[in-house]
Every structure is written in C-alpha cells, then in structure tokens.
Image (cartoon, rainbow, N blue to C red):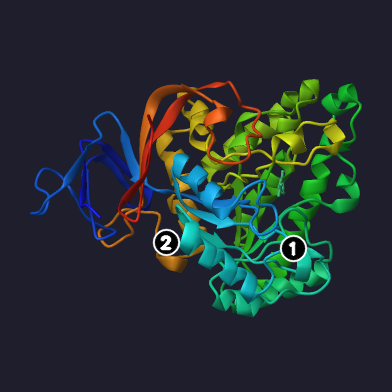
Amino acid sequence: MKNILITNGRLIDPALGIDGKLDVALAGGKVVWTGNGHPPEGQWEIIEAEGKIVAPGFIDLHCHLRQPGSEHKETIATGTQAAARGGFTTVCAMPNTDPPIDNQVATAFILNTTAAEGAVRVLPIGCISRGRRGEQLAELGEMAEFGVIGFSDDGSSVPSARLLKQAMEYASTLGLPVLEHCEEMSLAEGGQVNEGIIATRLGLAGIPNAAEDIIVARDIALARLTGARLHLCHISTRGAVSLIRQAKAEGIRVSAEVTPHHLTLTEARCLNYETNAKVNPPLRTSADVEALIAGLIDGTIDAVATDHAPHTDNDKCCEFNLAPFGISGLETAFGSLMKLVHTGRVPLELIIEKLTAAPARIIGGLHGITGSLKPGDPADVVILDPNAEWTVDISVFVSKGRNTPLAGEQLKGQVALTIYGGKIIYQAD
Ligand code: DOR
C-alpha cells in the first residue's frame, strides 16, 4: 500500500471542527498527519485536491445489501462497490435478508463475506425479533458479542409495544440502540403512496402520515419509560419531526435519520405510476419536505442515511401496486443532497456532518469508527467536487439495483475519489 498525501484541498472534518485548507497524510491504513506545508518525511503518492473538498469517508446508517437470499438484487460485493462510488466507507446493513440476520451465525456470515468480498466496511444490524416475525426476541446478546451495532426489524415496525419494551431493556444493557421502522401496520396496510390528492388521482391506496407519527409517539414513550437509546429510521413526516424535537427537549435518548429522497423529492414523483419512486415510507408533500429540512438544520434529525434498497428492473417493471418499495440510493446520495446546498437551503458543512460525525456518534465508537480524520483514525477519506455536473446514468451503476427516480437527471456535486483503509477504491472518470 502506497503512502498518500492529499494536498491543497479544503478539509471539512466536522467532528474536529475543522474547515480549512489542510493537507492529509495517510500511511499504514491510518491518518498519520494533517497540516500545512511540511508533511512527515517519506515517499508520498500525491493526490492534488485543489478546488475540492476532502472529508472523512461517509457513513451510511441504513442500507440493504440483500445477501443472503436475494443476491439477484444485490450482494455484499456489489453493494459495497456502490457505496465506494457514493463516497461511503462504512455502511450499516439492515437484517431483512432471507434468512434474516437474527443470530450470531448469520451475523458472522455478514462479517466473513465482507472480509472476503467487501469493498468497504459493513457493520451488521441484527433483528429485534426472531425471523422478523415480531413475536419473540432474537438472540440480541449473542449478536452483540459478534459486533452488531444495534437492532432493527426494518421493513416493518415491531407491532407489539410489549416486545419492543423488552427489546429496549435488553438493548440498553448491551449499550446498543434499537433502530425502528415507524409504520403502524393496520393504517398502512395496502397503501402504495402517500395518502392525499396524488393517491386519489392515481386511484391507489394511501399511507397516511399518521401511520408514522403513531409509532414515533409510541416508541418515544417507550424510550422515556426504559431509558433506552432509540433511533428512528427514515423519518418522512412533519409530525414525526415535531415529536422528535419535543422528545429531545425532554432529554429522551432519541436520534433520527432522513434519506436524501425524502429531503429532495415529493409524492408528485409517483405521477405516471413511476414505480422507481415507490418507497416506504412514501415520498410525502412539500410541507413535509420543508419540515424535514428544518429538522435537519436545527439538529432534530441527526443524520442522513440512504435506505439504499436495490431491486431488479423486473421487480419494478410492473403494475404500481405489485412493485416492491425501495430506491437504489448509494450512488446518488451526495449529488442529490448537493441540490440543498446549491439552492442555499443547507450549508455544505452540515451535509458533511450528517454523513460523517453524526452517524459515527450513533454507532457510538464501535469498530473504531470516528467519522473523523485525526491522526490514528482509519484512513477512510472522500474527495468531493462540489461543482462537477453529471447525469445520473443507471447503465453505469455498480449496484445491481438501478431503481432510481433520478435516472437521466442532471446533478451538480460529485464524489471524485474514495479511499478506504488507505487504498483508493474509487475514482471518477
Ligand atoms: O422502501 C423500502 N424498501 N423501505 C423499507 O423499509 C424496506 C426497503 C427494502 O428492504 O426494500
């Protein structure tokens, strides 16, 4: 492995409060120096980053890698290559695979496959309930020993408040969070898109905001009761934002994430029965998008996570109500978030914080993840060209999932280069 010196870039490292022209030296898989002018003695491969942003590699708290069981949609190999293309050096894998990751052997499978085939670090999330059936607790303690960073039945909420309370009590003795998919099942059942005028026009059943708000409120009450750490996944409603804001003001240990698509798109994307815009939770209204942006800015929403949910063309090429929910998001995350920067809505430094220091805090230092670039930290770096314009071309996606409503769209802001453990793993053409 060559030693790398990244020069003349603007280093943005929110965990350390750094934003300025600083060089970064990487050796032996670690950051060894940041500074100006006089790098340590040695042979360096120089990467010129004039006009570019240098930041810690992005961390995705929420993605679906589909292995084991749905390797036709994605594998750990292809999903982590897509992560590299998106500037992510750490991704947390949701356990709704087939079989689900609900015991130590399945957890070990994820870690071993990543060690053999992964392009970036994969941190497994274990199920809350056995088989994700919502009936009995999964092997939380054993999975914690094998390195899961938290527990989730993502894809569905835990229907029983009693079981979730138990899960929270166990998870807090293990020092880990519960990551909840917030969707009250009886309200959402059969729903295809956001409940409202677009659903009516399309003649499709809707999923009301209340389906999310009810579970957010219930789970906050349980976090208050148990003192456990609760992380709320892919928040999409204005009601959820205000509930989380109140809970944080009360001192409850709650954190939340939002996806790039919920921050930048509305339900209108589903017009023309666009199945690539069918996602769960559904794309909502512009009032919801505004509340999500406000929540991101005031800290109510801690992190941005992709909810990368790859599906095949065949899966999505069908009647709207037969198509699976999900958007392939790793390769477009940064470019779409830059829309918020270029329109003056959100500062670039905040976007970088939400993709680095913030998710690292939620992972809580496990697996040596810091989300920063101080000497001694892993040499996980992303170099970004904030002004590069590019067209989303799904034919060059490295994810097997080409299911994005952004196909053909022009974006401004691109990942130029990704370094993982001191090695260049992706470079834009
Ligand atoms: O749109 C979604 N797709 N939302 C989820 O919660 C699950 C995911 C999937 O696994 O496809």
- Residue in the image at 77% along x and 67% along y: 131
Left or right of 14? Residue 20 is: left
Kindly identify the amino acid type of the residue bearing the numbered disc 1. Answer: Ala
**Is 128 left or right of 36, judged from the image as shown?**
right
Circle nearer the viewer, 1 or 2? 2
- Above or below — where is 215 with respect to 45? below
Say which label, 1 or 2, has the lower sequence index: 1
Q: Position of residue 224 (x, y in %)?
A: 69, 66
**Helix, strand or loop under label 1:** helix
**Mark 2 — residue?**
369
Q: Which mark is residue 221?
A: 1
Mark 2, secondary structure of its residue: loop
| Residue at image coords 77%, 57% | 157
Q: CA distance from mark 1 to mark 2?
A: 30 Å
Give 77 or 249, whichever is nearer the viewer: 77
In this view, 201 is above or below 171? above
Q: Amino acid at mark 2?
A: Ile
Residue that appears at 87% across and 40% down? 191
For residue 345, say whether it is visible: no
Image quarter of the C terminus: top left
